[in-house]
Amino acid sequence: MTVSVSWIGALIGLALAIILILRKLNPVYSLLLGTIVGALIGGANLTQTVNIVVTGSQSVMGTVVRVLAAGVFAGVMMESGAANAIARGIVDKFGESLAILSLALATMIITAVGVFIPVAVLIVAPIALEVGSRMKISKLALLVALSGGGKAGNIISPNPNTIAAAHGFHLELSQLMVADFIPAVFGLVATVLIATLLRHHGTIATMADVEANQEQGDQQETTLPSLGTAIVAPLLAVILLLMNPVGNVLHIGFLEKFNVDAMYILPLAGLIGMLAMHQGKQVLAYTKAGMARMTDVVLILIGAGAIGGLITTSTLPAAIVHLIKISGISGTFLAPIAGILMAAATASTSTGVILATGSFGKAILAFGTAPLAAAVMVHTGATVIDHLPQGNYFHVTANAMNMTLKERMQSVPYETAVGLTMTIVGVVMFTLF
């Protein structure tokens, strides 16, 4: 039996879920409760409401499977010290004379190879504070370099947000990673320019900050793998993920036929990388840690799928399309706006992307926006204001840089500028060319 929920009920449900998240209720329960209340207010009965929740949750199972598979790769990169080795290797190669660039690039790369952005900042922060104390660079500039670099790497990574954006619009993960590359480069450039201008603004990093970081951090000084072995897993993953897109562009038959999903590639690359680092005995520990890191994301995916089911079964998408058409605004802008607003509300790139694609995906495509263009604009839009105080990222990064909340707030506009740069580039790429 088909049910159509009124747009008012869907809007109330979405608003309730966001308010509850802001009030610190568990995001999964917030999303599920918002779905139930919205469905009932919108005219569905109890049985129909259950069907909406179940159907919506089932719609994200493909993404859930891929996120869980990515946990193997993430666990290997984070727990083995490979990400730390890559970060230190990059900073050492560039030297302190290019400190801002090296720190931003290091955070970008280790995020791009599958490390969560908060973890990436935690990994690079001690290095940044050490370099900053010697080069007399402000903590504000250092944080902008790390956060901006992380944002740039996050949109080209096999992280849950990229997986959600790709499969929300029925794309291959590699397609979106390639399409996001140009916005990511512009994001890196913007990061370096802004951080360089800020290097003498605010409190200068000192060795006291380094010591405070070591005291509150849980990172232990362990023997890191060599840079050569540390890059095996990410390099193999990138090569395998790009084989099909490269084959399609160059019309190479063998590569065109290599259509292997990220669900296979990421765990395989992680396991081979683990063997290259001579850590084969740690397979159980690394995979367990990777699964633990993905659990929260998977639960949020289920909740977001439920509320996405509410909105797609309602008249809200049609109402939005009608409203935008009569206003004269290009429907193309719905994609980045949805990403910006949902990520701002939840202070999370991943949750913002999940909500934007699940809730507004059909409305975005209804304007004739190509799926790849929609995914890029939603994804880059979700990086604009995803660092607000109601989210975990804000506080994790403040602690990592030994900053007060007031000091941490000063970086918010500059981080927003980086995300906005990537979003503008993404929109221009698919509207003017």
Image (tube, rainbow, N blue to C red):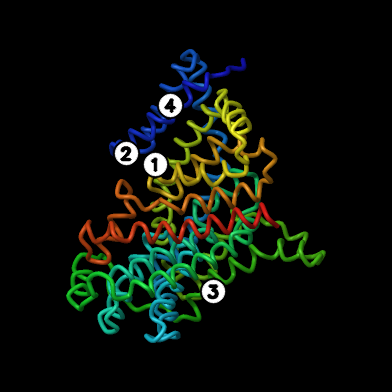
Query: Residue under circle 1?
Result: 345
- Above or below, comparing residue 182 to residue 99 in the picture: above
Residue in front for this viewpoint, 86 or 355: 355
When the figure is inspected, residue 281 is found, relative to residue 96, above or below; the finding is: above
Front position in the image: 423 or 280: 423
Q: Which circle marks residue 13 in the picture?
A: 4
User: Which amino acid does the dot numbered 2 rest on?
Assistant: Leu
Left or right of 296, for residue 161: right
Secondary element under disc 3, as helix, strand or loop, is: helix
Q: Of tags 3 and 1, which is closer to the observer?
A: 1
Query: Dots 2 and 3: beta carbons under 8 Å?
Result: no
Circle on res. 22: 2
CB under 8 Å between discs 1 and 2: yes
Q: CA distance from mark 4 to mark 1?
A: 14 Å
Separation of residues labelled 2 and 3 (CA atoms): 40 Å
Q: Residues within 10 Å of mark 2 (few under 14, many from 20)?
A: some
- Residue receiving disc 3: 232
Measure how far apart labels 4 and 2 are at the Cα level. Answer: 14 Å
Q: Position of residue 313 (x, y in %)?
A: 57, 24
**Spot occupied by residue 269 in the image (x, y as percentages of width and height):** 56, 65
Amino acid found under the numbered disc labelled 3: Val
Q: Is residue 275 above or below residue 359?
A: below
